[in-house]
Image (cartoon, rainbow, N blue to C red):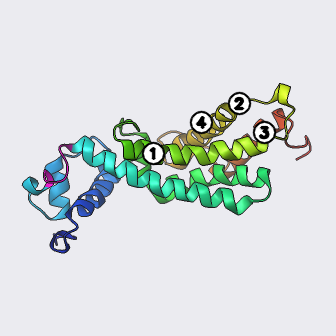
Amino acid sequence: MPKRGYHHGNLRQALVDAAFELIETRGPTGFTLSEAAKQAGVTPAAVYRHFEGREDLIAEAARQGYEIFADLMEYAFQSGQPSALASFEATGRAYLAFARKYPGHYVAMFESGISVNRTPELAEVAGRANGVLERAAEELSQHIPPDKRPPAAMFSAHIWAMSHGVVELFARGAAGNRSPFPPEDLLESGIGVYLRGLGLVPPDQ
């Protein structure tokens, strides 16, 4: 296998790219650092110049995933402006699109067991991604009377959980989980039901 990036001084990124491929095919616990080194075309000893163990390698993969995720969420949010409703719905769709386009990143972020607090850098970017959805929820919740308004953090957590559930059950080929409806329709209708319950969407929409 050709060495990817090693002679260009980019061994660290070559190892992360190898990890993404292995995570997609074997899962986050289905490979060793030595296998990641082989995938990257370098010796196992070279890995330890950059990562102390597999968990550190996966944490860096998760950090890079959150960077892309946060950028996509921000773009989705801005694409819906100035409509708070359009911005909020767009962030939900962005979650689904990210999971489909970046499966290795998604697994490293959400299914590896790596805490977002493992490193300050990972915590910072994960907080930035969550902050976009929370900001969208905050803007939309301003249309709810104060006495009926849920906290923005709770509002965004509900939609995050719904988006994650649709992804896990119906958008990533989970065995035995089938729906006659496309994941996009499931998510959109679920968000619609939630928003109608808060009085943010007219009953006939």
Q: Which residue does the numbered mark 2 point to in the structure image?
A: 151
Characterize the magenta stretch by its predominant secondary structure. Answer: loop
Element class at badge 3: helix
Q: Position of residue 116 (x, y in %)?
A: 41, 38
Camera-nearest residue between 52 and 102? 52
Q: Left or right: where does residue 76 sit relative to residue 32?
A: right
- Precedes in sequence: disc 2 or disc 3: 3
Q: Label 2 vs label 3: CA separation?
A: 8 Å
| Residue 141 image label | 3
Q: Which residue does the numbered mark 4 point to in the structure image?
A: 161
The kind of residue tagged 1 is Glu
Q: Label 2 vs label 1: CA separation?
A: 22 Å
The residue shown at (13%, 54%) is 49
Q: Label 4 vs label 2: CA separation?
A: 15 Å
Q: Which residue does the numbered mark 1 point to in the structure image?
A: 124
Q: Is residue 100 above or below residue 167?
A: below
- Precedes in sequence: disc 4 or disc 1: 1
Neighbours of disc 3 within 10 Å: few (<14), some (14-19), many (20+)? many
